[in-house]
Image (spheres, helix red, strand yellow):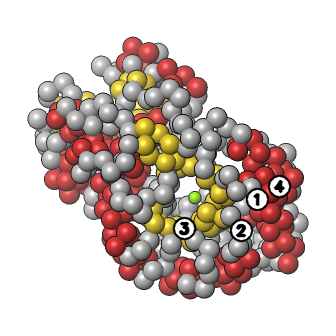
Amino acid sequence: MKITGLQCAILGNHPILRISTDEGISGYSQIEASKADYIKSHVLFYESRILGQDPTDVERVMQRIRRLASFKPWGSAVSAIEMALWDIAGKAAGLPVYKLLGGKVRDRVRCYNGNIRFHMDGHEPQHFAESMAKMKDRPEKFSIIKQGIAFHSPMPAQIPDFFYGEPTDQPQHPNRGMLTPKGFKHIMACIEAMLEVCGDDVELALDCGPGFVVPDAIRLAKAVESMNVAWLEDMLTGDYVPYVLADNYREVTQSTSTRIHTGEQLYLRQNFVELIEGRCLDIVGPDPCDVGGIAELKWIAEYADLHGILMAPHGTLDGLLGLAALVQVGATMPTNYIAFEYPTGNPEWWYDIVDGLPDPIVVDSHVAVLERPGIGVDFRIEEAKKYLSEADKGFFD
Ligand SMILES: [Mg+2]
């Protein structure tokens, strides 16, 4: 089998990829919506480098392009190509991708909610409590719910004198600095308000940064030690930070019993070596669509497990193909696996153009393993075509 084409289209809010072959099998994958305005040219950069290759030799194709990418957002195109290759390899073999990754070790894959969030009128404790009540009320009955606080929220710009720095409301969380006493108390009050709602039924995960300085990170981690906090995520570095700072993470992690989580912006297993070997974190959270793909994610899970570190992958934001990929790889990960961040379809018609997902998708915070050949979902092509823009019209032809 040979690769004959690589395309990228925007479907609703989602960039989607298609790799075509000379045997009529196509592989599909997806990239997070926030990258839609620039990702097409990233993807097409790789086309000439993979044309003519056998897509079922996934690793051999990846070796041609893996060096030509980097940390978020530059690793997304390569990661999405990897997942589309697995989709083809599975379809060609007549097997779900989890079989090709080593087979399943669980029948249901746990997920957590970090994406189904509700509008908040402000960022005071009562707003966090109200929002948490709605998230807890969801029919999916998520066992872990993640909320953004501190530098991973509008607090630095909205709460007066929150930190010793000049607040900016630019995207991708650029604020950083030492917290003021008011800022620290505000964070604690919001956490306590949410925990009140969570009770013992739901564990609270907190996406915190990037932006904390090391002493503040240690102080917050110690302050929540006796509480139902699943983890503190990306305190020092995170989203769109193109480096690791393993020593700083080690200092935080080894000074507290609160679980410290990071890794969503990192590209490739090599960039986890220092974090994992140095026991610089408790939970590693790569995003399959930034780290280099699902086989890369599985390798990191196994390496982390050898070192006593847990795995909770970041969710390829709001996409059903991303969801399917997370379920496939989630089925195969070792027992250090906790849960993946649950992605949704957006707009709502995404649920009408994809076949293969159970209904309801999530039961008791778990998704049953998808058994179709390939990544586990297929487009209803005639339905999906209706939503292509004029520029992407021939995508499915
Ligand atoms: Mg995060």
Where does the image place residue 209, in percent across and percent down from the top left? 64, 66
Picture coordinates of residue 205, whole percent (x, y): 64, 59
Q: Nearer the viewer, mark 3 or mark 4?
A: 3
In space, the residues marked 3 and 4 are separated at their CA atoms by 23 Å
Q: Residue at x 54, y 22 (%)?
A: 349
Whether residues under marks 1 and 2 lie with C-beta atoms below 8 angstroms apart, the answer is yes
Crowding near the residue tagged with mark 2, few <14, some 14–19, many ≥20 C-alpha atoms within 10 Å: some
Residue in the image at 55% along x and 43% along y: 365
Look at label 1 and name its amino acid. Answer: Leu
Q: For the residue carrying disc 1, how many other residues have a C-alpha within 10 Å: few (<14), some (14-19), or many (20+)?
A: many
**Which residue, given by chain and number where applicable, does mark 2 sit on?**
227
Q: Position of residue 283 (x, y in %)?
A: 50, 67
Regarding mark 4 in the picture, which secondary structure is present there?
Answer: loop
Q: Which is more foreground, mark 3 or mark 1?
A: 1
**Label 3, on which residue?**
261
3 or 2: tag closer to the N-terminus: 2
